[in-house]
Image: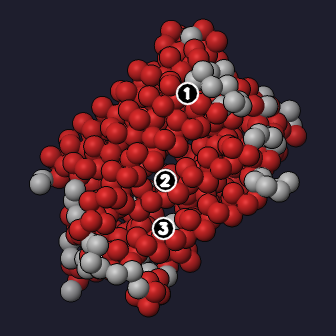
Amino acid sequence: MSMKKSFLLLLTGNTAGQLITLLISPILTRIYSPDDFGLFSVYTSLLVMLLSFSTLCLEKAVPLEKDIANVKQLIATSGFAVIIIALIVAVLGLTPWSLYTIYGVHTTYMNTLLLSLGLVFAGVYQVMSYQLLGVQHYKKLTNSKLIQAISNGASQLAISPMKVSSGFGLIIGDVIGRGVTTVYVTCDFFWKTKDIPVQLSKMTALLKKYRNFPLFSTWSTFLNVLSTQLIFLMLIRLYGVEITGYFSLTQKSIGMPITLIGGAISQIFYSEASRLFEKHAKKVLHLYLKIIKWCFLAGVIIFAGFAFISPTVFSLVFGSQWEFSGELYRSLVFLYIIQFAILPISQILYITGHQKGQLLIDALRLAGIIGGVFLLKMLDVSFEGSLYFYSGICGVSYIILGISGYIILKRNVQKGSSK
């Protein structure tokens, strides 16, 4: 299958899934309160942070491994790691150190158990999605996005009358959606490989072979995710759950075109670049620059243009009480434009083996966010002003990443030409 057809296939499936989410969102915002969305954003934030390291980042090694027996060992290793982390989360929920308390939120133990279960499903799905990328099974990957959107939205609507605790319907609906999707992507692979045993010796050997992923990529991914999720922690601590709910809707809604198009391109780029980098670095560089150029131009048109009408659109689509979410969008336009341009090629340092460089960039971004936002708070800068700073520091870090990837690819092209 050509790269263009693969991209269109992924884009079509992602579009269908996101359209379902978009159609359901106006209903959910009229059923659930900003407080519900605030707690759901805490659950989502914790899930994303845990997911960043619980798989040991071995999923990124899966497309690089051609032996299906070794692929199964890598998947098993990641799976065991995820289950261990999930059990730790569940146990912590029985103590005063429940992860929800990091955000200053006290909720029921049921939501802690749902967080653990959601982590297992999300972790296994993340690893299996890279396995599908490795074998270029884009249709199944596309179908999985559609299945998750349908099961997630349907569950959140069906459970909405059950007011067990704040945010319960949104959280359990998300867990159900992830569970259904995980079953879909795993059954076929494990049926085909049922005769291949999981062996501790092989798992250990592969863990040693790909040790840079857990040693460096895990920390890099965690810091990268922490820098994007830290804003939720700071908002809740400084401004409360309600305002975090408004910000959460902004992030969720505007993240749609970014994950829709950028995510589809990223999956194709990772698959193609992993396959071509060693012998055809020039082709990878050409594809790299082409993606950045066209995504940047599209991002300027889409996100800058939307800023003129965002409060009105949010009010009409989600209800008048959500107009403030549209106003918050304007503080984040720069970040969305740059993120849209760089996200599709953001894994270039993993592909080229420069995990330490990725770790440095992510660490500097995180330090900038923490130091800058708290300094602005001490200076009594407004909430919107803090978001402008957050947008700027994250946007600049993406630009540095893009430039770093270009330099590395250019050097590899020159080395290839000199041979």
Residue found 42% across the figure and 55% down from its top: 125
The residue under label 3 is 79
Q: Secondary structure at mark 1?
A: helix
Looking at the picture, how far across and down is residue 387, in whole percent?
A: 67, 35
Q: Nearer the viewer, residue 162 or 171?
A: 162
Q: In terms of image quadrants, where is residue 267? A: bottom left
On the rendered structure, is 351 left or right of 28? Answer: left
User: Which element is circle 3 on?
Assistant: helix
Closer to the observer: label 1 or label 2?
A: 1
How far apart are the alpha carbons under marks 1 and 3? 29 Å
Element at label 2: helix
Residue 143 position by quadrant:
top left
Depth check: give the residue in front, 32 or 285.
32
Between label 1 and label 3, give the one nearer the viewer: 1
Q: Which badge, 3 or 2, is on the more N-terminal residue?
A: 3
The residue to which callout 2 is attached is 122
Residue located farthest toward the left when viewing the structure as drawn: 1
Let me know if residue 308 appears in the view. no
x, y percent for residue 99: 74, 52
Question: What residue is drawn where x is 61% and y is 54%?
Answer: 116
Residue 270 to residue 4: above or below? below
Eyeballing the image, is 384 above or below 188? above
The residue under label 2 is which amino acid type?
Ala
Going from N to C along the chain, the mark reached first, 1 or 2, is 2
Q: Amino acid at mark 1?
A: Ile
Q: Residues within 10 Å of mark 2 (few under 14, many from 20)?
A: many
Crowd around label 3: few <14 · some 14–19 · many ≥20 (10 Å): many
Residue located 45% across and 63% down the image: 404
